[in-house]
Image (spheres, rainbow, N blue to C red):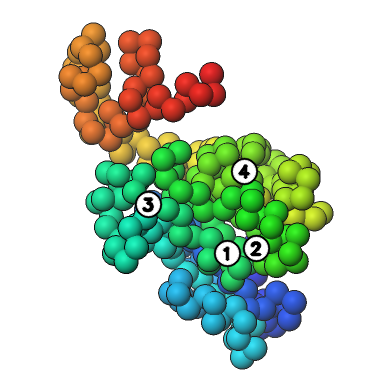
Amino acid sequence: DVDAAAAAIRTDGLPASLAPLTLGVAGYGNVARGVWHILDRLPVQVIEPDDLAGVAVDPAASRHVIYAATFREEHIAASLAAGQPFDLQRYYQHPEEFKPAFEPYLPYLDVLVNAIYWTPQYPRLVTKTYLRDAMAGDALRLQVIGDISCDIDGAIECTVRATEAGEPCFVYDPLTDETTDGVAGRGVVDMAVDILPSELPRDASEDFSRVLAEFIPALATADYSAPFAELALPAPIKRAVITHRGELTPDYRYLLQYL
């Protein structure tokens, strides 16, 4: 129960072995807003990502709050050109010109919630190599990952499989590259349920229906015999089209390597 946990943290504080407890939310869209809807019920102190390193090792940090930071694109990637400031539009248009930049934050995070949109051209948040090296060096602080985006082998590389609501977590062992159902064992606990909205079926149905209703006329009148480039669909719908006329669309041709 979230409210009971909040009351316990406020009154008794977190165990000394867990404090200070740091949490990162990667992303700031609709999924991340859902995360914060829950976090706002807990005693959370919002900090900036660049403050994590100091808070994580501060002996005076409070045991009665969770320190939480939001990570945006500029915390996840950096330009390959030395000294070049981060340019969001350039990042989305030319991701090949950028390198991963998130790893320096990982030594200071206990919990990471992944709520970003990810495709293979973008950098990962957590790699198996980082987890293996950190654990081998007894420097792995990260204990729990809530991979809400749940892209298999994606932004969270140790999300090697999806889980079901009845058994939502597994433990990933970086040294053996194996997983064990549950939350006990050596490694990082990963929550990787890929159908989380189905846990709130009425809310999910109403929300999706409201959003999709405006697209129905265009879906009904589109000429699906036209080439994909000429297919007249609203941009959000067109970006979600994986196959058209028996072929993968341009944004999804990377899937060929898995077929």
Mark positioned earlier in the residue sequence (1 or 2): 1
The answer to whether residue 73 is seen in the rendering is no
Picture coordinates of residue 103 (x, y %)? 53, 61
Mark positioned earlier in the residue sequence (1 or 3): 3
Q: Secondary structure at mark 4?
A: loop
Residue under the image location 45 percent in, 38 percent down: 120
Check disc 1 and give the amino acid type: Leu
Q: Secondary structure at mark 1?
A: helix
Picture coordinates of residue 78 (x, y %)? 38, 59
Q: Kindly report which numbered mark, 4 or 1, lies closer to the viewer in this rendering.
A: 1
The CA distance from mark 3 to mark 4 is: 23 Å
From the image, tell me which residue sits under label 4: 159
Looking at this view, is 97 or 64 the one in front?
A: 97
Check disc 2 and give the amino acid type: Leu
From the image, tell me which residue sits under label 2: 142
State if disc 2 and disc 3 touch (CB < 8 Å). no
Check disc 4 and give the amino acid type: Thr
State if disc 3 and disc 1 touch (CB < 8 Å). no
Looking at this view, is 232 or 81 the one in front?
A: 81
Mark positioned earlier in the residue sequence (3 or 2): 3
Picture coordinates of residue 246 (x, y %)? 38, 10
The CA distance from mark 1 to mark 2 is: 7 Å
How many circles with numbers are drawn on the protein? 4
The circle drawn on residue 106 is 1
Q: Is residue 6 left or right of residue 15?
A: left
The CA distance from mark 4 to mark 1 is: 16 Å
Q: Kindly report which numbered mark, 3 or 2, lies closer to the viewer in this rendering.
A: 3
From the image, tell me which residue sits under label 3: 98
State if disc 2 and disc 1 touch (CB < 8 Å). yes
Check disc 3 and give the amino acid type: Phe
